[in-house]
Image (tube, rainbow, N blue to C red):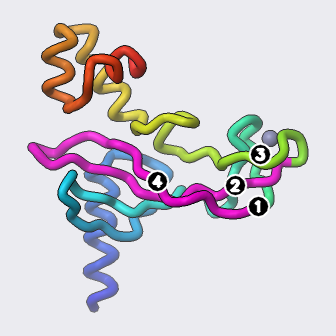
Amino acid sequence: MVARARARVEEVLRRLLGVKELVVRGAHFEPHGVEVEVRPRQRRARCPECGRPSPGYDTAPSRLWRHLSLGRTVFWLRYAPRRVHCREHGVKVERVPWAAQGSHFTYEFEQMTAWLAQRMDRTATCRLMGINWRTVGTVV
Ligand SMILES: [Zn+2]
């Protein structure tokens, strides 16, 4: 019963995040917002260069990606990416479905920021998205 209710909450969270190809494993409040623990839906890790499923090498430390806000609450995705050993490209941090390689932001966050930056001035975009001027430039 508890497990089923938990599975429902995780499904609601997954839909709320609006990110396909990920599984929600849990969530908790932190001073900076809600951290949602996720993992890629694909069981096998993929090389970021060629996208091929590759054997695991080890796991990198867990990290955060800034996602969109719901009201005043900022959502963050937390995951410890695996490192893969690609036959062609060597040891690489796996590709995750919610963010570009090396980005601290999810695709949805970047798209929203870029969209706003085209329609309003940077100061307004910064205030609305809670990021600084340089970050807007990087995202755009
Ligand atoms: Zn590769």
Question: Looking at the picture, how far across and down is residue 73, in whole percent?
Answer: 15, 49
Q: In which quarter of the image is residue 72?
A: top left
Q: Is residue 55 visible?
A: yes
Residue 52, which numbered label?
Answer: 3
Q: Is 132 located above or below residue 55 in the figure?
A: above
Name which of mark 2 and mark 1 comes first in the sequence. 1
Instruction: Name the magenta segment's main secondary structure.
Output: strand
Answer with mark 1 or mark 4, whichever residue precedes in sequence. 1
Rounded to the nearest angstrom, the CA distance separating label 3 from label 4 is 23 Å
What label sits on residue 83 in the rendered view?
2
Which label number is shown at residue 57?
Answer: 1
Spot the residue most to the bottom.
Answer: 1
Q: Disc 1 marks which amino acid? A: Tyr
Q: In the visual, does 47 lie left or right of 98?
A: right
Amino acid at dot 3 = Arg
Tell me residue 126's x, y (percent).
Answer: 20, 22
